[in-house]
Image (tube, coloured by chain):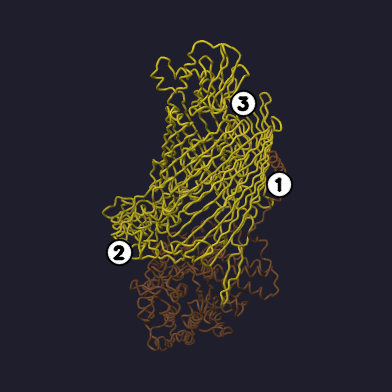
Chain colours: A brown, B yellow
Amino acid sequence: MKKALLTLLISGAFVISSCKKSLLDQDNPNTLTQEQFWKTESDAQKGVNAIYHMFYQPGSWSRWIYFRLDLTSDEGFSKSPWIELADWTRFQYVNYNFWEGNQVSYRDTYKAIFRCNQVLTYVPDIAFADQNRKAQVLAEAKFLRGLYYYYAALLWENFPIVTTLQSPTDMPQQSSLAQVWAQVEKDFSEAAAVLPAQWNGNDIGRPTKGAAFAFLGKTYMQQKKWGDAKTAFDYLVTGAGASFYDLVDYKDNFRAENENNKESVFEIQFSDANKTAEGDGPSSNMGNNRAQFFAPRSIGWSDGQARNWLVGEFKKEKTVDGKIDPRLRYSLFYPGLEADFGDKTYGRSWQWDADEAWFRKYSRDYMRSNEDYFSQVNVRMIRYSDILLMYAEASNELGQTAAAYQYVNRVRQRVNLAPLATAYPAIGTDQGLFRERLKMERALELCGESVRWADLKRWGDLDTQAGVAKVALRDPDFNNFVPGKHIRLPLPQLEVENNKNLKQNPNY
Amino acid sequence: MNKKLSQGRDTNIPPNSIAKIKDRIFKTVFTMLLISLAIGVKAQQRITGVVKDLSGPLAGVGVQVKGSPLSTITDANGKFAIEPAKDQKTVLIFSFVGYIKQELPVTGTQPLVVTLVESTADLNEVVVVGYGTQRKQDLTGAVSVVKAEDVKKRQATTVAESLQGLATGIRVRGGGQPGSEAQIQIRGLKNFSGTNPLYVIDGLVTTANRDFNPADIESIQILKDASAAAIYGTRAANGVIIITTKKGVEGPTKIDVSAKTTIQTIPRYKLAETNEFATLNNMAYDNANVKRQNLDLTTNTDWQDAAYRTGLVQDYSLSFSGGGKDNSYFISAGYFDNKGAVISTGFDRVNFRVNTKTTKGIFTIGENLAISNAKADEMSGNPILSVVRLLPTIPVYNPANPGGYGYGDEARARTFGTNPVAIADLEDRTNENLRIRGNIFSELQLLPSLKYKVSLGYETSRDHYSYLRKPGNWTLNQAYDPAIINENRGESSTILIENTLSFNKDFGKHKISAVAGQSYQRDKYAQIWGTKRNILANPSGGYYDVLDQGNEPQTGGFKNRTDLISYFGRVEYNYADKYLLNGVIRTDGVSRFGKDHKFGVFPSVSGAWRISKEDFFKVQWIDDLKLRANYGTLGSSNIGPYDYIAFINTFPTAVFGPGQSVQPGATQVRLANPDLRWEEVTQQNYGLDAAFLKNRLTISAEYFISRTKDVLLQYPLLLSTGNDGGNPYVNGATLGNKGFEFTVGYQDNRAALKYGATANLTTLRNKVIDLGYGKNKTFVGNTVTEIGQPIGMWYVLQTDGIFQNAQEIANYKNAAGKVIQPTAQPGDIRFKDNNGDGEITNSDKVVVDSPWAKYELGLNFNASYKNFTFNMDWFGSFGSKVFNGPRSVTDSFSDNSNYRAGIQPWTPQNPNTDVPRAFYGSTINSRGDTDRWLENGSFARLKYIGISYNIPDQLIKKIGFRNAQISVSGQNLITITKYTGLDPEFSNNSIFEKGYDFGAFPNLRMVSFGLQFGF
């Protein structure tokens, strides 16, 4: 016992003497500190890759953004039993803090912008062997920041611009829609100047010069700067980039096979490598949840579905050989799908209501009978047919209606439809008639691809009560739409309350 | 004291009434009477006798001859022998800690049989105050002592759960689920980051979590104010709970056994059955002009029956204790098993403990060692909400669904409610840990007044969590999942090394004691985890649930470490028991803060004046009167180990290229504040203690003011910062607490019927003095936290009744004549347009009420008569407003869920109701941010009632027992409240939303049967 005692006393004394303050300097053994990072080319590359990871997060492009862009528009709607979720697709915004409807997308937009701003703040001070590579990294970050601001402008409009790293106490000023558009134009222009025309090998999927010009054009389109838009699109349609782009087999735009094809101008690279939760944890999910949320009842959550008027529109015009427009087959699940094309829905015959339809684009029913949260199908954010139709639209708005025909025809020919002038001879060079037809051409080509909300806003169809009433004929949810109010989302109320520089959007 | 004894004799034993004697007197006291009545003094002066109390012989009782230095102590059987000089009036004095001192003139037959009575307010009681003890009468700070018996009598998994209502200023909210931890809060919210106090078990800084067996407790002291807790400095801001475990006492081996069985039932909602449900559901659809559901009227499922069952707790403990002159031992074992009141939940625990101590010369060495293994079968999902969200028309089983369970159906029952039977079967979660906790200490009595002590503490827990997902669905439209296994193993360890030097000396009327010490603590935690999918099914049933099976592996792991170095000292000065002064200083350095902020210094001073000891104090009816005051500072560093360091998240990967190659990414996700520093609580405490009526009536009153500055909190950041992964800590706010505690106790042990009552009252008001980041207010959920107001006030729209007709809607205008709710229909809610703009918007929200109780009351009664003992504890909390989350589901009608039985939505035929018209598919009448869901959260609850019977000595002696007791008790049997939720005593972890009942697991009703015996 004396021995034990002695040991104790000695160890006690030892501890007193060894209790150095250096014991209190414990570094995090788990990961790099902020100070250790942003030193090398590899750090810069990782930093920019982390921005793309934001595509895989639910407020961004793995889930909820489709509710805002596809379901809020007149192409889609929600019959979800989750009433609040459905209310947010039909302009019944009660609680502005509703996470799934508003806050999470607002939050994830800023998360992505934070990642962009880190690259744009730190990378300029990193020494690169290849200056061109450095410029490209910065250009990627600018492209992605522009992309997130583009959608922020579309959704909230008066979205505070943040281009610097924020401290916990920073309260950014409110920005006007015009200011946000200016920021988007700047980012895309600067990116377009630097990004390469094509990427090779394991870099395929990063934005190209064409992608930057495409989004720059889209940005101008939303502001009705038709000339600028057409100039931006020139690169892809008539300019140096034209040879990189073409139209492909229509269905190849929505499947896991033949991704990053010639029609793809920019697409999100999804993967089912990690069947785990989304977020920033280890091995987090890189798949898309959209199909799980839009799959028909008893297959998926069925929180969103297509408006049935689309089926009628598709059937109004037959192909030159008298068949149903093949795009219908790959766009929608609808009651006549099996009769018209012999396709079942996830292996089932039609078991839903006769006036219903579901989105088929990006679904995996061609390869499996159910869905999950890990869809590997890339989302084509912008594809060449969209460019062609916008090019036609810009031309028409500039008074070059006759010149616009060829671009629409190219899109129609791919699916074996007659030239526009043949099918609709009444249009002629009437700018208004051409515009109206183009609206439908866009719906038939692009329905369910998250462009309709921007289209409706650009066309001004939601600016007047009369315009809204017309849209409401296709989608009765628009009976709730108040012009001047629901054209933009409310800002999350907590953000307004906690940032004294911020005012809630008008009429909210 | 002399007076006391004679008084007792007069009252208790009238010599002429045998009947009364029979009624009132313990036989031992009767013997004393005979002794005192005996005439004549024996010539021989060897006096022998036995000293006992109600439960048996007492060892170690001091026996002294009055007026002589001659003394002895009783042996293990309570026997003593003493030989005073011949004297006609020998008077013996019997004294023992915790008992009333007795003086007894030796006049009768021998052996003497002396029964000591436990004191109710023994001023010599010793209180453990951290690195030493103090006499209770010398206390200058706010310390509550809870008796082990009071804790033991309740059926609780953790110590915290059993403390409620036993001391002032302590607020406890039980966890409810098997193996869940209770929340405890001492004297209000000091910060936003947590309320758990520091636990010190036998000198080891730890947590008295579910691994700790409450049966091992000898005593609990709760240090509530700064002066009391200051010796623990940094981590003591939320108070300190000191637990001393049992030690052996000199004498032959004592074996104690206790067994307790408890039946638990969960409170239930009264929900609609199919017929009533269908009527209401159809009404909601009809009103909304939506085609009715094709309800399955042939099914009538009571989901509460499906999800709940009668819980059962079995709690056994066994201990051996004893010792010789120089050594002692205490060995115990315990087994605790709880079959949960929710299906597929449970908890069991096995405990062992060995406490030993031995002394040789000036050396003392001892150890305390506890080993426990705890395993919880955890609840999946939240059945408390599921039973409400599921419809009675859904069957429990449905073979048509994957997995075979019933759940929502698009055409027949649209709900995303989770089938609790399905999730219980399809998801298995178990959490098991082995904990070893112990310390070894050695003392060296260098001088009679100087003692050196070194203590080495070690605690480790090996944790194993496993999760098994079986294929199958539990809710409508669920995504497909294959069989999945996830396992994680964690390991925590704490090393604590302490050196203390203590000095104790009396210089005449001056008493000085001092402690100086140093301590070093290191905490480590590490975890690894792995997940596999598509694990192999066992053809004989179930799965091979090991990580070798399956595919698509994912793994991970991390580790943490915190170091703490401290130096501390305390000086106590006592002049003639009249003036008491106490000073403490502690400095702590912790690795959790950056270079310039690691160390904090936390001093405190306190003093007390014992007025009743003054010569001028001649108030006969006041036995004791003491005034106390103190002031001190405490610290807190309740944050993660590396929170001050901004780190890079290396997980955000991205795929590129035709082969979808995964490429690494790295970025900062979470912001950090690099200059984090100690949070400091400054407290003032003023107290008064008094005793009257021969110490039968005691009162104690305390008033305290505390102010916490640099509160470490995870302040919600603006979304525009882009921060995620948790809000960074910041030394943000300043909080104030003011409170008053009052305890009055009466204990009368003079008659055979002994009885007593204690009432304690706590009032507390917290106030935000300053908010971080230069803000005036912050909003979280339905609450606002504003400078000058308590934390988390309800901030909602106000309802103003129901529109009865179109006229009322049209007439409801603002000052400018604008119709405020033009789209409303009769039966809809009228909201107050508080800003007068003629519209109902978020800017009409106002602060409507406080989630905090205005006062809390504890009442304890005890009585004993002959061999019966009765106890009853009430706890009440009054004046809070709480948000009934589950009611916002059952009463909403906008979404499908079951409804409250008997609910009366507004209809033109039934306009006299406070429930608006049922309307499916719109949240207009059921929005979650209105005062419609706020309710009065006041309640009074019978926390405990119990009766026990000590089997008479004659009976148990025959079978060789020392004592035996049987008892029956109940917990939470009566609750008086207007709250319509399951349990007004719910808990919510969010400090900003303390009053929000999200469907919290309720406190269970329990009935226990216990058996306890010793031999």
Q: Residue A342: x and y, percent?
A: 37, 80
**Mark 3, residues whose alpha carbon is within 10 Å: few (<14), some, or many (≥20)?**
some
Q: Which residue was labeled with disc 3?
A: B577
Q: Which residue was labeled with disc 1?
A: A19
Kindly tell me whether residue A150 is visible in this rendering.
Answer: yes
Above or below: residue B179 compared with residue B537: above
Image-based side of B100 in relation to B561, left or right = left
Q: Nearer the viewer, residue B777 or B326?
A: B326
Q: Which residue type does callout 3 highlight?
A: Asp
Picture disc at residue B56 = none
Residue drawn at x 62%, y 77% is A193
Mark 3–mark 2 contact, CB under 8 Å? no
Camera-near label (1 vs 3) is: 1
First reached walking from the N terminus: tag 3 or tag 2: 2
Chain of the residue that carries numbered disc 2 in the rendered image: B
Q: Which residue was labeled with disc 2?
A: B294
The answer as to whether the residues below labels 3 and 2 share one chain is yes
